[in-house]
Image (cartoon, rainbow, N blue to C red):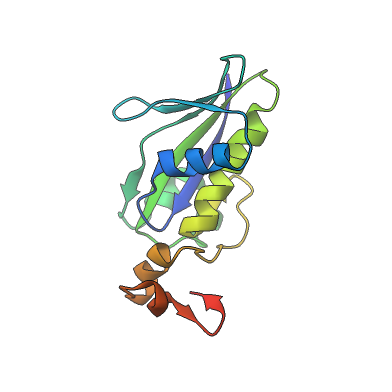
Amino acid sequence: MSSDLVALVRRRPDVHAIADGMIAMGEALELRGGEPDPTCLHDGEGRLLVSIEDPVQVSVEGEIGRLLGAEFAARVAEPVWWVDVRASADVPDAMRVARKFADSLVRWLGGMVYPEGAADAPARSWRAADHDTGADQPGDAYQGGVIR
């Protein structure tokens, strides 16, 4: 059995880039798989820690509420990209890595993580910010010391 998280993000995520970033920042992980198979993160001993499904765009009004509940959906505006992140059960550190991955998606692309979704995080990437502001260039999304 696994523990599941759902990252709901504003722009189509590059799952491999986020995982590569985690590895570059010191996570002892091995990246395997990907399109069309799930992307998998393994520990140094080769054990599967996290399985990440390909992102799916959700643009149907009310779909998030049907799947995750009206209270959570009230804080999410469609369209969003839905990313299932599954932590292997009974493997030390799997849930921590899964949560870190999902939180990283939200940090860079804006959005929320379910369950325990915090308030909608501002996008830290100008590419994500242009989704809301129409900015085409990095400088267009950066205004007054704040990445919008």
The answer to which of 118 and 29 lies nearer the viewer is 29
Labels in figure, total: 0
Rendered view: 129 above or below 6? below
Rendered view: 1 above or below 131? above
The answer to which of 63 and 42 lies nearer the viewer is 42
Q: Which quadrant of the view contains residue 5?
A: top right
Q: Residue at x 37, y 60 (%)?
A: 78
x and y percent of residue 101 in the render? 55, 41
Rendered view: 72 above or below 30? below
* Left or right: 130, with 88 as reference point: left
x and y percent of residue 10 in the render? 41, 58
Q: Residue at x 60, y 52 (%)?
A: 117
x and y percent of residue 59 in the render? 30, 55
Q: Residue at x 65, y 31 (%)?
A: 95
In which quadrant of the rendered image does the N terminus lie?
A: top right
Rendered view: 46 above or below 79? above
Q: Which quadrant of the view contains residue 46?
A: top right
Q: Residue furthest bottom?
A: 144
The answer to which of 30 and 8 lies nearer the viewer is 30
Q: Residue at x 43, y 43 (%)?
A: 17
